[in-house]
Image (cartoon, rainbow, N blue to C red):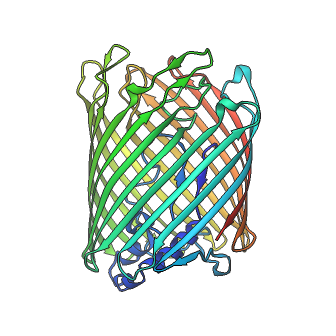
């Protein structure tokens, strides 16, 4: 719904991943082995996604989403070998290039219901993935871009890009270390918590990321540790009244770390506990005559991870979050219960249903506000209409609560789309979506609704 994702299917991701770690299949004898092979987030998949429109939120998936133990196959994961992209071999590396060209439409380009302006746009999205084909260890490099041009409202043109690399070292069969690095120029979604609706030029930022992930699997139990650094550099934005605002006060560096322990009770059920900590350091001392939002965040989560063959798989976690600000006299320290729940239900071989429920305490950049609660429910249905065609229907309801202002914003989003793989190298995508942003309170922007449509042609090798 306005976000442009340049990616291959999850099914392709899993099949290429299996090639990359074929020597590790013996690990499947452990209760977590299947998850280690199946989850892209843990062992560095050979394909990547470049997201060029962002909500600037923590990932809308649970950080313990390695619940896939190979007991179920969703519609989007089901292999179709005759439609797989084969790539080009360069020594011990496989190169997968892709080019997507799209035509899109928006009935409210500037997100202003009082003065709606519609327009069409074209986008050009090159993508390339280079991944090693080694029996152990792995190296992966990807690059992508989203060049978008509007027919009339050229102020909304976008030039987004994304480059990333990752490496995995298989120290032993049970011990792996992964390093990830990424840099991208990303445009914020108008449905973001930090953006007011009356922007003439979309807000964009340069983001860099460097992180490590270590996994030690002992059979019944697993230890996971992560450490990362993310920086944000925001560009200036222009409002509908012509005022240009410098967003340097939003520039920051975030350091974060997590530690997770998971214990399996059966091959289908485990319990986990996770501790998280982060530190936000803003680059300017003051913003709007107020101290900056330097802060520390903490979260403890306890949950269960399950994968019941032929029925469902998922993760459900309940936790407690706390964020404290250095300028506690200006910004309220906030704490409360958090929820992370994600499940996939398999009513039939041709249909998969995904559900996400999330409540998270996040840092925001609104004047005189330090943090907010992001509450959201998302439901997605994938149906294999034809052997090589998947239809997806999705909807999301979210509410952002700002305790310091006693205000909130309600967001409603829905989308219907289809993905048709004509041949190995040719694919077609079409979708239509609707979004509604309804703030309740001053300083949160204007309410708006937007209808978007898009048709894409994908060529890949």
Q: Where, quadrant-wise, is the N terminus in this rendering?
A: top right
Q: Is residue 264 left or right of residue 112?
A: left
For the image, the number of numbered tags is 0
Q: Is residue 456 left or right of residue 328?
A: right
Q: Residue furthest front?
A: 91
Residue 309 drawn above or below residue 259:
below
Q: Residue at x 64, y 51 (%)?
A: 394
Q: Residue at x 61, y 48 (%)?
A: 146
Q: Residue at x 27, y 28 (%)?
A: 333
Position of residue 293 measured from the top left corner of the image (x, y, whole percent): 31, 27
Position of residue 119 measured from the top left corner of the image (x, y, whole percent): 76, 34
Position of residue 234 measured from the top left corner of the image (x, y, whole percent): 45, 32
Visible residue check, residue 109: no
Could you say which is closer to the camera, residue 249 or residue 18? 249
Position of residue 235 measured from the top left corner of the image (x, y, whole percent): 48, 30
Q: Residue at x 50, y 18 (%)?
A: 443
Residue 178 drawn above or below residue 275:
below
Q: Quadrant of residue 148?
A: top right
Could you say which is closer to the camera, residue 229 or residue 445? 229
Residue 14 drawn above or below residue 330:
below
Could you say which is closer to the camera, residue 86 or residue 198? 86
Visible residue check, residue 86: yes
Q: Where, quadrant-wise, is the C terminus in this rendering?
A: bottom right
Residue 209 drawn above or below residue 172:
above
């Amino acid at each position: 719904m306005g976000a442009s994702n340049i990616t291959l299917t999850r099914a392709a991701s899993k099949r290429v991943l299996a090639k990359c770690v074929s020597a590790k299949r013996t690990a499947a004898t452990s209760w977590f082995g299947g998850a280690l092979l199946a989850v892209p987030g843990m062992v560095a998949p050979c394909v990547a996604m470049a997201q060029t429109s962002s909500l600037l939120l923590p990932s809308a998936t649970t950080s313990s989403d390695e619940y896939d133990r190979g007991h179920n196959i969703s519609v989007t994961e089901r292999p179709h070998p005759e439609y797989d992209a084969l790539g080009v071999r360069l020594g011990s590396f496989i190169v997968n290039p892709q080019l997507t060209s799209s035509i899109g439409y928006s009935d409210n380009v500037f997100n202003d219901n009082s003065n709606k302006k519609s327009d069409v746009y074209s986008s050009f999205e090159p993508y390339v993935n280079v991944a090693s084909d080694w029996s152990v260890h792995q190296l992966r490099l990807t690059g992508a871009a989203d060049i978008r041009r509007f027919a009339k409202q050229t102020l909304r043109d976008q030039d987004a890009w994304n480059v990333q690399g990752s490496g995995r070292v298989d120290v032993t069969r049970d011990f792996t270390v992964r390093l990830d690095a990424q840099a991208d120029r990303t445009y914020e979604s108008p449905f973001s918590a930090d953006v007011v609706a009356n922007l003439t030029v979309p807000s964009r930022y340069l983001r860099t990321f460097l992180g490590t992930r270590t996994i030690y699997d002992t059979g019944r139990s697993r230890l996971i540790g992560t450490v990362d650094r993310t920086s944000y550099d925001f560009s200036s934005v222009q409002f509908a009244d012509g005022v240009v605002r410098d967003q340097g006060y939003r520039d920051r560096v975030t350091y974060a770390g997590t530690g997770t322990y998971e214990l399996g009770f059966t091959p289908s059920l485990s319990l986990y506990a996770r501790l998280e900590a982060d530190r936000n350091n803003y680059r300017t001392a003051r913003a709007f005559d107020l101290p900056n939002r330097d802060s520390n965040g903490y979260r403890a989560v306890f949950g269960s991870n399950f994968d019941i063959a032929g029925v469902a798989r998922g993760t459900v976690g309940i936790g407690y979050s706390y964020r404290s600000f250095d300028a506690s006299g200006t910004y309220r320290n906030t704490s409360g219960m958090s929820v992370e729940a994600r499940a996939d239900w398999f009513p039939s071989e041709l249909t998969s249903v995904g559900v996400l429920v999330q409540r998270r305490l996040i840092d925001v950049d609104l004047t005189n506000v330090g943090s907010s609660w992001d509450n959201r429910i998302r439901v997605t249905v994938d149906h294999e209409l034809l052997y090589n065609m998947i239809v997806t229907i999705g909807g999301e309801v979210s509410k952002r609560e700002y305790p310091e202002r006693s205000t909130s914003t309600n967001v409603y989003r829905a989308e219907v789309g289809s993905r048709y793989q004509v041949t190995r190298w040719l694919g077609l995508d079409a979708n239509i979506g609707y979004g509604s942003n309804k703030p309740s309170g001053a300083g949160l922007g204007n309410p708006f609704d937007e209808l978007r449509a898009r048709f894409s042609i994908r060529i890949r090798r």
